Image: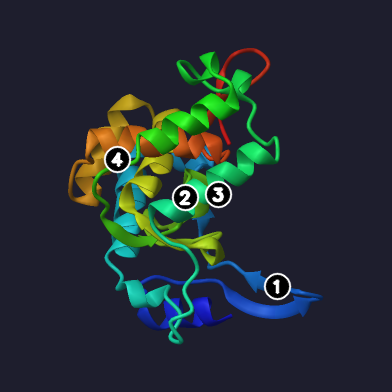
Amino acid sequence: MALLDRLAGSAPFAVPTIVGEAGRWLVTARPDGHPADRPELHADPDELVTAVGAGLKALHDLPLSALRADDGARPPEGWPAVAERCRAAVADGLVDSAALPGPYDRYRPDELLAMLIGGRPSAEDLVCCHGSPSAGMLLVAGGRFVGFDGIESALVADRHLDLAVAHQSVQHHLGPEAVFRLYDAYGGDPDVIRLDHYVLASHLLGLGVHRDEAGEAMPR
């Protein structure tokens, strides 16, 4: 896979390796390490959330060429790519707004999509994004970030897409105070307006926190 090859040549962290093929699909082996959502890793939340923030920063600091094809045949990227994924999710009936936390649960999926489209940010900060960096997708070993799971779906998008997903996941697993440490480790605070916009996008994409049957918040 050209994407994994480019990442392997650019990234200061391990990326999945291709170990075989199954029909149209490539079989990959993820880097060594443990998903950051494992409860046994939460004994030292400061160390863990520092690893999560450092991992996102390392990814976002990569040159965009790590994801863009050399032949210039680029798929949609940036806000249009995220919006198109959200449109497809709503059109395919994949959004259950009743399972979302407030205030999103007040609206039909098509209304949430209209809010997203109408609230398009006036500016973007395009980076190499994972796309769904929940704690379970960030791999740590010895208290340090070592790589990502699911990096094969990476895209060029506003950094706030990743921050929105990581923010919700860290808050769920480690509590609200850990979110501040996340941004300290990342090296900067988010733009609150853009963060809110991409939190909505994350819900439409099935990447945000939802409610289970008992009404408890659960990560996707």
First in residue order: circle 1 vs circle 3? 1
Q: Determine which residue is flagged by label 2.
A: 82
First in residue order: circle 3 vs circle 4? 4
> Which quadrant would residue 44 be assigned to in this image?
top left
First in residue order: circle 1 vs circle 4? 1
Marks 2 & 3, CB-CB < 8 Å contact: yes
Numbered disc 4: secondary structure: helix
Q: Mark on residue 46?
A: 4
Q: Mark on residue 27?
A: 1
Amino acid bearing label 1: Val
Q: Mark on residue 139?
A: none
Image location (x, y in percent) of residue 214: 65, 12
Q: Determine which residue is flagged by label 3.
A: 85
Vertical relation: 190 (above or below) 11: above
Vertical relation: 96 (above or below) 48: above
- Report, in whole angstroms, how far the alpha carbon at label 2 lies from the one at label 3: 5 Å
Disc 1 packing (10 Å; few <14; some 14–19; many ≥20): some
First in residue order: circle 2 vs circle 1? 1
Numbered disc 1: secondary structure: strand
